[in-house]
Image (cartoon, rainbow, N blue to C red):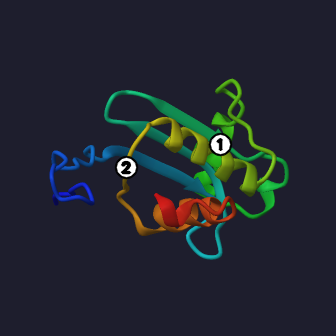
Amino acid sequence: RRSSVDSGLAAHPEIVTPPAVRVFFDTEFSAFRDGRLLSVGLIAEDGRERYVELPGDGFNRDVSDFVHASVLNQFGLVPDSQAGTLAGLGERVSRFLEQLGGPVELCFDYKLDRRFLEEALRLTRTWNVL
């Protein structure tokens, strides 16, 4: 697309949009049916990464056997990863994505990953701009 000065005497070079930074992410959630988000890990193509988890208090009563056996025992191992609320998790993820400095392409392998991340980001009112 070309843009020109109002007088029509000079043309601006073509406006180039930087390529989107691909960000791969995965979530952990309590169960497939009626589940809730527990954590999200993101990594950009250039190696920048972010991991955010919700506090593990109270998860034991409504998680699947797999989550209980394989996920919850990993919580608390990554420094500065806890967000107090789902909105707080969304804010941390949103800040990470904004720091990438340009368009972002979110890559995921399972529809519930997208659904849970979207839910958290919508609480920050940034989902529509990503």
Q: Which residue is mark 2?
A: 103
How far separated are the C-alphas under marks 2 and 1? 18 Å
Work out whether residue 118 or residue 126 is closer to the camera in this orientation and state it. 126
Residue at 72% of width from left, 31% of height from top? Answer: 76
Earlier in the chain: of badge 2 and badge 1, it is 1
In this rendering, position of residue 50 left or right of residue 22: right
Mark 1, other Cα within 10 Å: few <14 / some 14–19 / many ≥20: many
**Depth-wise, is mark 2 or mark 1 nearer the camera?**
2
Q: Residue furthest bottom?
A: 33
Work out whether residue 124 or residue 53 is closer to the camera in this orientation and state it. 124
Q: Which mark is residue 109?
A: none
Q: Which residue is mark 1?
A: 92
Secondary structure at badge 1 equals helix
On the image, the x and y values in percent for residue 126 come to 58, 59
In this rendering, position of residue 56 left or right of residue 49: right
On the image, the x and y values in percent for residue 112 come to 49, 67
Amino acid type, mark 2: Pro
| Residue 64 visible within the image | no
Count of numbered marks: 2
Q: Is residue 81 above or below residue 94?
A: above
Residue at 30% of width from left, 47% of height from top? Answer: 20
Work out whether residue 116 or residue 123 is closer to the camera in this orientation and state it. 123
